[in-house]
Image (spheres, rainbow, N blue to C red):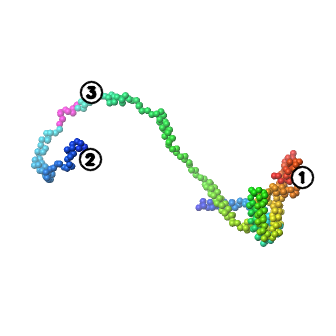
């Protein structure tokens, strides 16, 4: 009986341990939240539009992420473009022609802002390293 | 049956006349001979009882007088006077060949016969199997094994429960939606963007098919003047110097 209780305790501990492991998907949620906020604000999505738009967008996003990195650049761009065209009509039905077109622009702008943020972080880090090297080399 | 046949054949070879006698009793006694025999014998004894044992008292066994006196000594002296034949003489008399052998060992075996034989026999004996003693496992190992198994089961259960069927709504991360609502409400986009790590941004961009290094260079060129085309021809380090200038080489 004692043994059964012990094994049960270990079993439950294992589950809770597995739960406590950091989930990489959770780390993505932050950027995802920024993206949703950015698109919502830029396209001025209403609550009704958001309820229709984000499920379709989730499918679209999954397909875009699924484009194989092993493809050469032109094929990869072509595949991504095909997916965008495929979803264009569905976005138009929800947002209308103009805002559906704006969505693709805003989507690209968000990634551009991410790149800029990354560049500034790296430039800042490199400048810090250079400064440290200079101080170290001072007599 | 065979026994009788053998006897008949043997008898035929010895005496054909006897062998031809049929198997029948050739002897006969008068009729009722034995019926009255015992009574006749008893009647004759009782009629003259003394006559049966008459004269027997004078016919007892006897030896000559003084027969046993000195008999033993006579036998011994007679034995002593006999010439005793030696063993070798007796063997010599019986067989000259055996006598010629004497005490020599006439049996031989090949050289190293027994040594080789023993080695060969030992080689044929199967070696006893190695005895492996089963060590008593410590209880810690039992618990560790149980923990590993339980962990695997736990992770499997989690993975099963986490694999929810695809539905469009489930594809939208609820936590991200709630967090996005807070960002809009607090107007904190730039502040939140500054808290995202370098690795997370790189991972996100790569997942969305972005060539991060190319995008970084492209982003930097927006703010910095590219070198003149002629500079690349006059100095082959122009590109390296430009990349150093924009501080993007890690």
- Local SS, label 1: loop
Residue B56 in the image: above or below residue B212: above
Magenta part of the chain: B62-70
Real-space CA distance between mark 3 and mark 2, rounded to the nearest whole angstrom:
57 Å
Q: Which is in the foreground here, disc 3 or disc 1? A: 1
Q: Main secondary structure of the magenta part?
A: loop
Query: Would residue B105 appear left or right of A100 to someone viewing this image?
Result: left
Please report contact status of discs 3 and 2: CB closer than 8 Å, yes or no: no
Q: Quick one: A93 or B107, which is closer to the camera?
A: A93
Question: At x 78% / y 60%, what residue is drawn?
Answer: A78
- Local SS, label 2: helix
Say which residue label 3 marks: B81
Question: At x 20% / y 48%, what residue is drawn?
Answer: B22
Say which residue label 2 marks: B5
Question: At x 68% / y 64%, what residue is drawn?
Answer: B163
Q: How many marks?
A: 3
């Amino acid at each position: 009986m004692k043994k059964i209780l012990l094994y049960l305790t270990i079993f439950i501990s294992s589950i809770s341990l597995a739960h406590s492991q950091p989930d990489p998907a959770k780390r993505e949620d932050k950027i995802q939240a920024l993206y949703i906020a950015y698109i919502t604000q830029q396209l001025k999505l209403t609550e009704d539009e958001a309820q229709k738009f984000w499920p379709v967008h989730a499918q679209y996003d999954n397909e875009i992420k699924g484009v194989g990195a092993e493809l050469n650049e032109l094929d990869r761009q072509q595949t991504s473009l095909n997916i965008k065209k495929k979803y264009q009509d569905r976005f138009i039905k929800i947002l209308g022609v103009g805002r559906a077109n704006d969505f693709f622009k805003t989507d690209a702008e968000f990634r551009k802002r991410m790149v800029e943020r990354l560049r500034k972080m790296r430039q800042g880090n490199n400048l810090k390293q250079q400064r440290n090297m200079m101080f170290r080399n001072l007599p | 049956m065979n026994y009788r046949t053998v006897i008949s054949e043997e008898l035929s070879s010895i005496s054909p006349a006897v062998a031809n006698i049929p198997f029948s009793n050739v002897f006969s006694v008068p009729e009722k001979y034995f019926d009255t025999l015992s009574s006749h014998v008893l009647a004759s004894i009782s009629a003259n009882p003394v006559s049966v044992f008459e004269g027997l008292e004078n016919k007892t066994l006897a030896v000559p007088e003084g027969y046993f006196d000195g008999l033993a000594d006579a036998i011994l002296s007679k034995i002593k006077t006999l010439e005793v034949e030696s063993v070798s003489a007796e063997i010599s008399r019986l067989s000259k060949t055996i006598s010629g052998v004497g005490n020599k060992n006439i049996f031989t075996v090949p050289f190293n016969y027994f040594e080789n034989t023993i080695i060969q026999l030992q080689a044929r004996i199967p070696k006893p199997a190695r005895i492996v003693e089963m060590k008593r496992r410590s209880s810690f190992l039992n618990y560790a094994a149980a923990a590993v198994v339980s962990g695997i089961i736990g992770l499997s259960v989690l993975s099963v429960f986490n694999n929810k069927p695809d539905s469009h709504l489930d594809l939208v991360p609820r936590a991200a939606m709630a967090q996005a609502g807070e960002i809009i409400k607090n107007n904190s986009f730039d502040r939140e963007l500054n808290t995202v790590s370098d690795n997370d941004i790189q991972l996100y961009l790569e997942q969305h098919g972005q060539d991060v290094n190319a995008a970084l260079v492209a982003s930097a060129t927006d703010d910095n003047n590219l070198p003149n085309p002629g500079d690349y021809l006059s100095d082959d380090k122009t590109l390296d110097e430009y990349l150093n200038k924009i501080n993007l080489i890690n």
